[in-house]
Image (cartoon, rainbow, N blue to C red):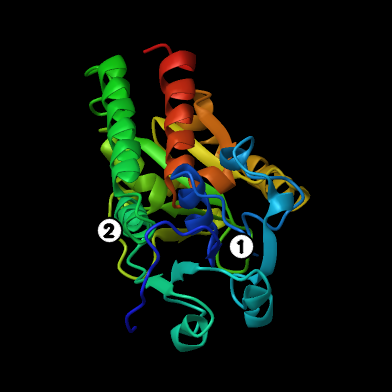
Amino acid sequence: MGESCVPITPQRVVVLDDTVLANAIALGIHPVGSVASNTTSGLEIPIFLQGKIDFEKIQSIGTQEQPSLEKIMLVKPDLILGFDYFVNYNQLSQIAPTVLIKWDEAGAWKKHLMLFAEALNKTQAAEKLLADYNQRIQEFKTAIGSQLEHFQVSLAYLAGDGSALVRSDVKNSFAGSIVEDAGLSRPPAQDIVGKDYYQIDLSAEMIHLMDGDALFLFSSGNKEANRILKQLQNSPLWKQLKVVQQNRTHIVDHSTWRSRNILAANGVIDDLFKYLIEQEKF
């Protein structure tokens, strides 16, 4: 997408994706401008960003799907960071040096962190973040021992649209990659690598495919999510699931488990400790 002369220590960074925003914050960079997305446009700050960012000091520059060039110009950035979708590199690079990373897949979040860190001259900081992540993963494995060697962890989120009531994340999703790092097994239907998508659609008649020894069900907690959850829980097929009968269904934060950044990754690990170590007491 061309070449940009990137400043060694950028002071006025604009980000075009909430993944980049969270990773920038984790790397010690406070952007001056950011797009609004499904994660950052609501009334509540995502759990993984709470206490780490002051949104009043970040100028909105439009939406993730349609950032405003005019608003970006007004904040006078010295670096623009994002992925290579929805945006025009040539237009952005006329405003400021621009780095757009090629989107691979949700499970490639560690690679994306390192690429953005390189653009921000924060490679050592990123390596430290990933080293800390790996240490927490090892601590989880040590705590759990061999007791969950064949324990299948199911991942699903509330959809409720025309094609699916719920969707299950597969191995190369964001959450799927962390669960795999943690050494946990997956139900057979979810133990696959998606090619174009990182989840499988499950209609009301297919929810048996989300059964397992533990189920992490992602919910935003809003009115629509609660409606879908109630519909799901009222289903006779839901009540037949082994994981439901054994009371091992855990409702977790949708924005954390379906994000793609290092802060959210640590939030997922927090939940693994909470529900599989502290609560289950294996």
- Give residue 37's position: percent from left, percent from top: 63, 62
Residue beneath the point at 48% across and 67% down: 79
Q: Quadrant of residue 180?
A: top left
Dot 2 corresponds to which residue? 193
Quadrant of the snapshot with the C terminus: top left
Q: Is residue 128 above or below residue 73?
A: above
Determine which quarter of the picture holds residue 39: bottom right
Q: Residue furthest top?
A: 281
Q: Which of 20 and 273 is in front in this view?
A: 20
**Element class at badge 1:** strand
Q: Determine the secondary structure under disc 2.
A: loop
In this orientation, which residue lies closer to the viewer: 202 or 41? 41
Q: Mark 1 or mark 2, which is nearer the start of the sequence?
A: 1
Q: Which residue is drawn at 48% across and 22% down?
A: 274
For residue 126, what is the image quadrant?
Answer: top left
The image position of residue 30, as x and y in percent, is: 56, 50
The kind of residue tagged 2 is: Val
Horizontal side of residue 180 vs 64, given as left or right: left
Residue drawn where x is 63% and y is 38% of the image: 50
Q: Which amino acid does label 1 sit on?
A: Ser
* Quarter containing the N terminus: bottom left
In the picture, the disc for residue 34 is 1
Q: Visible in this render: residue 186?
A: no
Checking the image for residue 61, the label placed there is none
Question: Residue 267: where, in percent of width, then height?
Answer: 49, 35
Q: Nearer the viewer, mark 2 or mark 1?
A: 1
